[in-house]
């Protein structure tokens, strides 16, 4: 652990030292007292960043409000990323100077000027300011810019009595990242406004611990639907990413989390199914534990088990947190599953979405990462998530509440 902190500190220092050259260049004409004040402020922030990050890593159980820790880490990360980008433009100037020096070494009359160009230094600061202001805006506004997306689902075998059925899907609440009640209260209000017949929640209720969700019990229990709220767990719900005093403590946390779903009236499907009926017509909702095609995430889902007893339903809707499950197993082995509902990717919380075009870095990891996908008669919908994790904001990829209407193909 100490080695990780020392390595991180060294990396921060080297980037800061390099970027500091821009600060020195642009403050060169300042009076000595002001120049010293700029230098002291710059290095004080760097030292504080190292101390804060190191403390959070070394002492994960410090009695600090969770949201304070998360937002502090996000701000440090934003500063680090911004200076890294600015340093890349300084590197361009240094490569230019190096090439000019090489030419001057061969031609003494070339008039080599070893000073750093002030213009390129200013460009490096501008380039550092762009991600800084963008990411800060993403924390203040983007994180809570909830979008209601409406998606018609045309299903070949849909019984007539289920035509027009409205389903709301939310995913990846990550309640541990919320500092206040008001954003989740808005989410609940938007859901209730839709008056859906069914609500789906597709995993990652918490970041790590059940208590994170328990803080919002009175809010989340207001998510209801006439035909029920159905939920599954995601990779973060198992508590795999924090240290525990014992295996028993970790298991107890998971029990608390699964019981929480039941306490607020959600039907948690742990490799199970629920059959909804209208007269003699049936619709099956299947739910599996986390199943990922990647070895980095758990694979506890058992789709064969989840289908037991639902074989006769003409339409099967699957809740599976990780969208890689769809292509890796669902469409290969279970052609009778009509639609899979997933989340997990958050759309990376960063990207570009305009009509007819979408891009995010996450697409280089997940082939299906946001929106509706189809192969043959089977469909997958990847919800962009309601919450956020790591970086406590969103830029270009808004948090999502999805409203589906079932139609006959």
Image (cartoon, grey):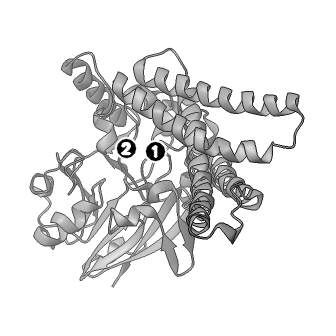
Evaluate if marks 2 and 1 touch, with contact meaning CB atoms under 8 Å apart: yes
State which quarter of the image contains the N terminus: top left
Say which mark, if any, is on residue 249.
Answer: none
The percent position of residue 144, horizontal first and vertical second, equals 62, 50
Q: Residue at x 31, y 26 (%)?
A: 256
SS state under label 2: loop
Q: Residue at x 45, y 41 (%)?
A: 174
User: Residue 204 got which mark?
Assistant: 2
Q: Which residue was labeled with disc 1?
A: 173
Q: Nearer the viewer, residue 321 or 40?
A: 40
- In the rendered image, which quarter is residue 97 located in? bottom right
Q: Nearer the viewer, residue 50 or 281?
A: 50
Local SS, label 1: loop
Residue in the picture at 22% in, 25% down: 251
Which picture quadrant has residue 206? Answer: top left
Could you tell whether 388 is left or right of 78 in the image?
A: left
User: Distance from label 2 to label 1 (Cα)?
Assistant: 6 Å
Q: Is residue 221 visible?
A: no
């Amino acid at each position: 652990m100490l080695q990780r902190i020392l390595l991180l500190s060294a990396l921060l220092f080297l980037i800061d030292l390099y970027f500091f050259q821009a600060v020195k260049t642009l403050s060169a004409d300042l009076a000595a007292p002001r120049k010293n004040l700029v230098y002291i402020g710059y290095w004080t922030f760097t030292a504080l960043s190292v101390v804060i990050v190191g403390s959070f890593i070394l002492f994960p159980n410090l009695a600090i409000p969770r949201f304070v820790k998360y937002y502090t880490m996000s701000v440090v990360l934003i500063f680090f990323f911004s200076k890294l980008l600015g340093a890349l433009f300084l590197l361009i100037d240094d490569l230019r100077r190096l090439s000019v020096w090489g030419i001057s070494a061969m031609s003494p009359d070339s008039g080599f000027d070893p000073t750093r160009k002030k213009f390129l230094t200013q460009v490096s600061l501008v380039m550092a300011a762009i991600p800084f202001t963008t990411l800060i805006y993403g924390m203040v506004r983007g994180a809570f810019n909830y979008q209601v997306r409406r998606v018609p689902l045309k299903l070949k075998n849909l019984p007539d009595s289920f035509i027009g059925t409205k389903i709301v899907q939310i995913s990846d609440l990550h309640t541990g990242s919320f500092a206040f009640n008001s954003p989740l209260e808005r989410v609940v209000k938007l859901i209730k406004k839709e008056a859906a017949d069914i609500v789906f929640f597709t995993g990652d209720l918490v970041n790590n611990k059940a208590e994170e969700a328990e803080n919002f019990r009175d809010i989340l229990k207001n998510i209801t639907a006439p035909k029920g709220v159905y939920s599954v767990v995601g990779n973060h719900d198992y508590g795999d990413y924090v240290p525990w005093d014992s295996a028993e403590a970790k298991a107890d946390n998971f029990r608390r989390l699964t019981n929480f779903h039941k306490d607020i009236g959600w039907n948690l499907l742990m490799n199970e199914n629920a059959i909804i009926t209208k007269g003699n017509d049936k619709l099956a909702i299947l739910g599996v534990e986390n199943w990922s095609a990647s070895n980095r995430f758990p694979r506890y889902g058992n789709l064969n088990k989840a289908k037991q007893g639902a074989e006769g339903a003409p339409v099967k809707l699957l809740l599976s947190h990780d969208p890689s499950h769809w292509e890796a197993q669902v469409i290969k082995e279970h052609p009778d599953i009509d639609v899979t509902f997933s989340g997990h990717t958050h759309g990376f919380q960063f990207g570009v979405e305009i009509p007819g075009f979408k891009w995010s870095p996450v697409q280089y990891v997940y082939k299906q990462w946001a929106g509706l996908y189809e192969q043959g008669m089977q469909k997958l919908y990847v919800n962009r998530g309601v919450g956020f994790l790591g970086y406590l904001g969103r830029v270009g990829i808004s948090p999502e509440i999805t409203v589906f209407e079932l139609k006959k193909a």
